[in-house]
Amino acid sequence: MLLKKTYGIDLGSSSMKVYSFLRNKTYLEKNMIASKGRRIIAVGNEAYEMFEKAPANIAVNSPMAFGMIANLELQEIALYSMMKKIDKFLGIGSDMFFSVPLDMTAIEKRAYYHVANGHWLRQNRVFMVEAPIADALAMGVQLEKNPGSMIVNIGAQSTQFSIITDGKIIIAKKIPVGGRQMNEAICSEIRKRYNLQIGTRTGKRLKLAMGRLNDQRKDARKVVGIDSVSGLPREEVISGYVVNAGIMNCVNEIAAEMKTFLERIPPQIFYHISREGIHLAGGSTRLPYIDNYLASYTGVSFRLSELYETSAVGGLEKIIRDRELMKWAQPVKQRKL
């Protein structure tokens, strides 16, 4: 008799995170696919290695956009490819727990159902957990009898603000600003200051290497890009100040939206949030000192999750391992969609 396989899955715009209950391990891989027409060339980390390097006839894209499934067929291929790496033989009838965005339409729910029950993955039971709930469980937030907690997730393409009270999300807001927009802002700033065009992968490396929000130490790195005037490759020394200027544009936008969001909260809930601190998660929170910077801007302290981008899948792991938490997972059947 085959053991029933259970997985916790977080489909992100940048990377996929899958927790396997049998192996008790979380796997992470880039959520990208390289294709030439209808033919798939590479999936996952291999596809990301081709990003911004592939010729014009090869498209390298993520099947997710702003935290939502943008291409159902490609997302199923990406997930199936990753699942095959985890388990060589995929048992029929697995339980799949998905971390999903808030306020989804019936069509968007159907997309998640068909990702788990399409051409390659079949006869799987699907459960959906709202992403802020999964983040809160991973960070140890008490959901029941909770006077008020705020969860902020800064992802690859979007930032989500959520207020949880007594186990329910009462207010939520999503803005289209995340790590990818920071990378693009760095590229734009370098193009303006140095007349040099670089790719977003280079922008991301500069962000991780030199990004500082309150530690303006003098730092510089050599990069190779394309001269905007001559169109030829050129080496340039990039100042850390320029990199920070690009990052600041996005972080200030997030902070301003967060401050406006906090002003909408009822005073009694805001009081509890200010005492507890705002819970901060997401892959883009790896940026050094981002919690201190946001705290100085909003006037509220922050509690940074050490799980970063694996926060949501960490919450799914807790639900899978503790049957008492199953009430936060909503079973989905095709007939109900």
Image (tube, rainbow, N blue to C red):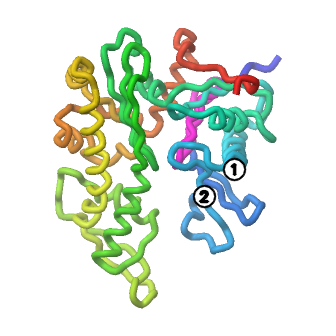
CA separation, marks 1 and 2? 9 Å
**Horizontal relation, residue 26 to residue 304: left or right:** right
Residue range corresponding to the magenta coloring: 7-28
Query: Which label is found at residue 74?
Result: 1
- Relative placement, left or right, of 177 versus 332 is left
Residue at 29%, 39% in the rendered image = 258
- Based on the displayed image, in which of its 4 quarters is residue 230 positioned? bottom left
Q: In which quarter of the image is the C terminus?
A: top right
The residue lying at 34 percent from left, 58 percent from top is 207
Task: Find residue 241 and name its label.
Answer: none
Proximity of marks 1 and 2: CB atoms separated by less than 8 Å: yes
The three-letter amino acid code for the residue at tag 2 is Asn
Q: Residue at x 74, y 58 (%)?
A: 40
Give how far across and how far down residue 124 sits, in percent: 75, 27
Q: Which residue carries the number 2 mark?
A: 61
Residue type at numbered disc 1: Leu
Looking at marks 1 and 2 on the same chain, the residue that comes earlier in the sequence is marked by 2
> Chief secondary structure of the magenta span?
strand
In the image: residue 181, left or right of residue 123:
left
Q: Residue 164: image x %, image y %?
A: 38, 22
- Tell me: residue 93, above or below residue 118: above
